[in-house]
Amino acid sequence: MRYRWLKILLPCLLLLMATLPLPVDAQGNRSAPNSLYSIWVRLSLRGYHQAEIESLLRNMDPKTLEEVKTQLRQTVLANLEMGKIKASYLASRDSDDLHNIRSAIETEIRFAGLETDRKLRDMIEDRFGIPLTRF
């Protein structure tokens, strides 16, 4: 008799647990997905270029846009550091190695949506010692 109730009760509990909504994250920050940084990254991943993104966000405060660009630049530099671009550049032996390094840098810049940002290119040249003018 006891097992009969258990056979009925257990599937009901599992069904109830599966249908309950998941709790909100611990921070409770619902505006984070809609932040300007997230919007910029989503647009760049959809294929928009820097000029297109800037024209879409032209009504935003210029100071806020510059803060977002600074955050994006720091993200690109951090990703390149994690990818050990400097070590790869110093260990490169032929043009294929340089092409791979150039491709990795261009990919990071494109994913960030900062294709025409001269300040980012200067920062990459200063931090990694890779002359991007030759690329």
Image (spheres, grey):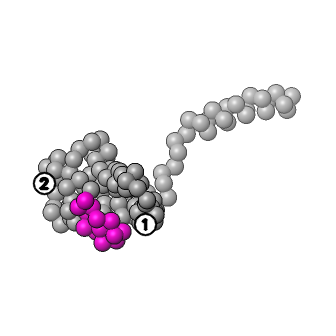
Dot in front, 1 or 2: 1
Q: Residues within 10 Å of mark 1 (few under 14, many from 20)?
A: few
Q: Is residue 64 left or right of residue 28?
A: left
Which quadrant of the figure has residue 118? bottom left
Q: Which image quadrant is residue 124 in?
A: bottom left
Q: Can you say whether 121 is above or below 111 in the image?
A: below
Q: Residue at x 31, y 60 (%)?
A: 72
**As drawn, is 95 to the left or to the right of 120?**
right
Which residue appears at 21% of the width and 47% of the height? 49
Residue 133 is a magenta residue: yes
Decide which of 126, 110 is in the foreground and name it: 126
Residues in magenta, as a range: 121-134
> In which quadrant is the N terminus drawn?
top right
Q: Residue under circle 1?
A: 90
Mark 1 or 2, nearer chain start: 2
Image vertical order of residue 25 relative to residue 11, above or below: below
Under mark 1, the amino acid is Leu
Percent of width and height locating residue 23:
52, 49
Residue drawn at point x = 13 percent, y = 54 percent: 59
Report the front residue among 36 and 108: 108
* C-alpha distance separating marks 1 and 2: 43 Å
Query: Measured from the top left, where is residue 120 in percent x and y?
Result: 26, 64
Quickly name the residue at label 2: 59
Percent from the top left, x then y, of residue 54?
Answer: 17, 52
Q: Mark 2: which amino acid?
A: Asn
The reply, left or right, for residue 88 in relation to residue 54 is right
User: How many C-alpha atoms fall within 10 Å of the one at disc 2: few (<14), some, or many (≥20)?
Assistant: few
Where residue 5 sits in the image (x, y, percent)?
Answer: 79, 30
Task: Examine the structure image and report whether residue 106 is included in the region drawn in magenta.
Answer: no
Q: Is residue 6 left or right of residue 74?
A: right
